[in-house]
Amino acid sequence: MRLSRYFLPVLKETPSEAQVVSHRYMLRAGMIKQNAAGIYSWLPLGFKVLRKLENIVHEEQIRAGHIPMLMPTLQSADLWKESGRYDAYGPEMLRIRDRQDRDMLYGPTNEEMITDIFRSHVGSYKDLPMTLYHIQWKFRDEMRPRFGVMRGREFFMKDGYNFDLTKEDALHAYNRHLVSYLRTFERMGLQAIPMRADSGPIGGDDTHEFLVLAETGESEVFYDSAVTDLKFGDRDIDYDDEAQCAGVMEEFTSKYARTDETHDEALFAQVPEDRRRVARGIEVGQIFYFGTKYSDAMGATVQGPDGKVVPVHMGSHGIGVSRLVGAIIEASHDDKGIIWPEGVTPFHCGIVNLKQGDAEADAACQSLYDSITALGLEPLYDDRDERAGGKFATMDLIGLPWRITVGPRGLKNGVVELTCRRTGESEELPPREAVARIAEIYAGMEVRGL
C-alpha cells in the first residue's frame, strides 16, 4: 500500500480524553474514532489489526477442533427469562423492544442462545463432544466506559461453548481451551498468564482469566514470578490427548496466580518471598466450566449410552478480540509510539523514501515494494512529499516492526538502511539483502506456526 493512497489520519497532539497509552496511540495513529461514549469506528489501520487478531483466533480454535458459526447481535429476551438471567444480569444489559412490543436485548454473551441451538438439534451422546464458537460484536452498557477499546461498551469478542456427556469430558474441554489460548496469545506476541478468577454472572466454580501484565490494568493480581518464565513455544499438541492437555494445564496453573477476587493471603504467603509479585493486569480472555447450570434450566439433554436422558455438561470460553488491540499496545510501546509484534502488525514493513521525486530513489523504492509484495507480504510505502523527520515520526507512531529507508546517499554506495522498531538498531544492506532479511523473518514465523 502506498501511504499517499491510504486513509491514515494521524494526529500530532494527544486528545484530552485519552487517559492510557493504548487509547492515546490508537487515536493518534488514526486507528479509531469515537462515535459515542465507549463506541468506536475502526478506521483502516485499526481494522487491519483487528482482522489479524480475529484470524489468529479462528486458526487456533479450528486447530483445537472447534467449529465456527455466527449468532446474531440481537437476542430475544424469552431465552434469558427461561434461564433466569434476564432480571439478574443487571443494568449492563441493553434492553430494547421491537415494533411488536417484544422484549429484546443486545447480546452481552450467548449462553442462552447456544443452549437453545444445541437442544433443538442434538439428542444423543453419539454427537458429543461438541464445541461451537463464534466471533461477534457484543454490548455491555458500562457505567463509566474508559480507556478506549480496553473498557468500551461495544466490543468484538470470541465466545465458544462446549457440550459434553460427563464432567470429566467437560474438564478435558476446559484444559484443551486453556492450551489453545496459550498458543493463541503467544502468536500475538503476548504473555497472557492464566489466573484463578471469579466467574461473575456467567456462573460455575472453575474459571481462569488470562491476564497481560500492564500498569493500566483494571485488576490487581498476585502471582509467583516463576509463572512469567513459562513459554508455550513450539509444542506439537494433540488436543484429543487428555493426559497431554492436562499436563500443560498443570504446568501453567500450578504456580500461584490469582486475581484480587480470589486472592488468598495465606496461600500467597507460601510462595518464596523473593518471587511474590503484586501488579496490575488486563484481562484478555477467560474460560469457564459451569456444569449443568444452563442445560438444567433450559432442557439441553441427550440420551446417554445406557438409554437414560441426562443434561449435558457445559463450559464457555471467551477472548476479547477488540480489547486485545489495546492490550498489545499497553504491553508493547515506547515514547515514540506503538511497537507491533510481527504476528499482528498491520503491515510487515515500512519503506521510507527520503527524496521523493528523485528518479533513482523512486525506482529503488518501487523495486523494494514489488519484491516484498511478490513474497506475499504487505509493505507500506511512504511516498508522500514530506520531510524525512515527519515520515520517521509517522512510522514510529504506527509501529511497524521493520523499516527500510532509501535515500540518494545510500544508493550511491549500493545500500539501504534496515531498522528494527523494537531495538532501534539499523544496518546498511544492499536492497536485495534487505528484502531477503524481511522474507527470512516472516518465513521463520510461518515455519514455527507463529
Image (cartoon, grey):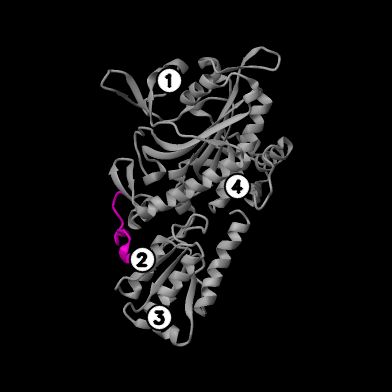
Region rendered in magenta: 3-17
Which callout, 2 or 3, points at the residue further toward the start of the chain?
Answer: 2
Q: Residues within 10 Å of mark 1 (few under 14, many from 20)?
A: many
Query: Mark 3 touching mark 4, by CB under 8 A?
Result: no
Please state which of the two labelled residues, at mark 2 or mark 1, is closer to the viewer: 2
Q: Quadrant of the N terminus?
A: bottom left
Q: Label 4 belongs to which residue?
A: 183
The Cα–Cα distance between marks 3 and 4, rounded to whole angstroms, is 41 Å
Label for residue 407?
Answer: 3
Which callout, 2 or 1, points at the residue further toward the start of the chain?
Answer: 2
- Expressed as whole percent of the image width and height from the top left, the position of residue 448 reads 63, 56
Q: Label 2 belongs to which residue?
A: 2
Dot 3: what SS? loop
- Expressed as whole percent of the image width and height from the top left, the position of residue 11 reads 30, 59
Q: Label 1 belongs to which residue?
A: 80
Q: Name the amino acid, label 3.
A: Gly
